[in-house]
Image (tube, rainbow, N blue to C red):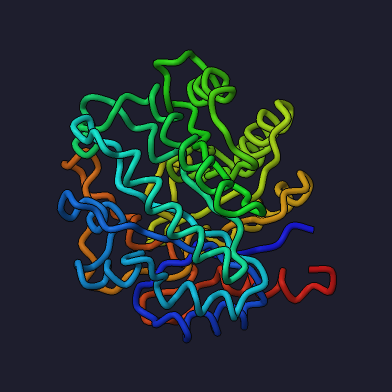
Amino acid sequence: MTKLRFWFNLRSMEAKKSYQVIKNLGMDSIFLPLIFPTERGDELSASFRFKDEEEAKKRYFKDGTLPDYITLAAKEFKHICVHFFHDAIYKDNLKWQESLVRDTKDAVSELSKIGINHYQWMLEHSLYGYSWHPVNKNFVPRDKVYERFNLFYDTCHQINKDAIVITGPYPNPLMNLDCGMKGWKDYFIKFEKKLKYDEIGLNCHVGVWIFAWNKRRLRAHIIDSVKFLQDRGNVIHHLEVGYPTTKIKPILGLYGWGREVDQKELLDVCFPAISELDIPYMQIYEFIDPERGFKVPKFLGLIKVLEEAHWGALRSDGTEKKACEWIREVTSHSSF
C-alpha cells in the first residue's frame, strides 16, 4: 500500500523535535536533502532558500562527515531516501568529474554504513538550461546532463552493491518543448536510453507549477504521467505532490496560492490515484514553512514567487495546518 512521507526541510524546528512530530503523524519514512558545499559562492544556499549561510551549513556534507540530522534520522525511521544536491557542471569547470566522484564516494560510503541505500538525483534540476535563465546560463547544455548523472550512478553502485539510484523528471507539459510538442515526454524519450537509473521519483506538483483546472484534471495528469513512464518499463519509487497555502482561493489552477483547505483537498485527490498505481510513496512537499525571516525569491529575477514560503504542512511556528488532519487520518488506518 502507498505510504506517506515528507520532503524534509530543516527550517524553524530542530531535527530531533521535527522527527518526533513526523512520527506522531504516523510516518515511518522520510526524504532528506544532502547538499555539498560549492566553491563558487552562495548559489546553493540561495537556490534552496535558506535563511542565511549559517543555516545552509547545517545541511552540508563536508570533510566526509554526514550532517547530524541524517545520522539521527537513521535511528528514527525505517526507510530513508537521500536527495543529492551537488555543484552544477559549469562550462569552465574542467574537473567536475573528479569532484563528483570524490564527493559521491565519500557520501555513499557513509550513508551505506547506517543502512541508507536509496539515492536520488533530480533530473528536474538540470532541465532549465534556457539561455535566458539567470541562474543556469553558465551550465552545460541539457543534452550533456546524462553524462553527469551516469557518473553519479556508476559511482553509487561501485561503492554500495545495494544502491538504488533514482532519477527525477518533472512532468510539466511546457518543459523541454525544444525536444518536441510533448515537452518533457519527448525529452525523456530522447534521453532515457542514455540515462542509467534504477527507479524514478516523479515530481508532480499539479495545480501549482503544473496547471489543473479541476479535480478530474488533477487526477488525470497524475495517471497520465505515471502510465507514460510505467508503460516504458520504469519503476516509480515515489510521486511528490505539494501545494502552498496563503489566504486566497486558487483561480483555475493557476500557480502560486491556495488556502489550507485547498492543500488538504489536493492531497486527498492525489493519494487514491497514486495508491491505485501501486507507487510505494506519496511524498509531500514539504514539512514546515520557513521562518518569517525568509527571503522571497523572484521568478526570472523579476516576479516575487510568494508560494515558496508556504509549502509546509506545518506553519513556521510548528503549528499544524489542515493537511495534518488528513495525514493523521490516513496513517491511522489499520492497513497503512
Residue 193 sits in which quadrant?
A: top right
Q: Measuring 70% from the left and 73% from the top, which residue is drawn there?
A: 329
**Residue nearest the viewer, comparing 102 with 325:** 102
Residue 263 vertical position relative to residue 225 in the rendered view, above or below: below
**Residue nearest the viewer, comparing 21 with 156:** 156
Q: Measuring 64% from the left and 55% from the top, which residue is drawn there?
A: 282
Residue 299 sits in which quadrant?
A: top left
Residue 241 vertical position relative to residue 322 in the rendered view, above or below: above
Residue 140 sits in which quadrant?
A: top left
**Picture coordinates of residue 163 (x, y %)?**
62, 52
* Left or right: 167 in relation to 61: right
**Picture coordinates of residue 307 (x, y %)?**
35, 55
Residue 155 vertical position relative to residue 15 in the rendered view, above or below: above
**Picture coordinates of residue 53 (x, y %)?**
20, 67
**Picture coordinates of residue 202 (x, y %)?**
57, 43
Quarter of the image for the C terminus: give it: bottom right
* Left or right: 239 in relation to 273: left
* Left or right: 159 in relation to 2: left
**Residue nearest the viewer, comparing 193 with 131:** 193
Q: Measuring 38% from the left and 54% from the top, which residue is drawn there?
A: 103
Q: Measuring 53% from the left and 48% from the top, which residue is drawn there?
A: 156
Quarter of the image for the N terminus: give it: bottom right
Residue at the far top: name it: 180
Number of labels in the image equals 0
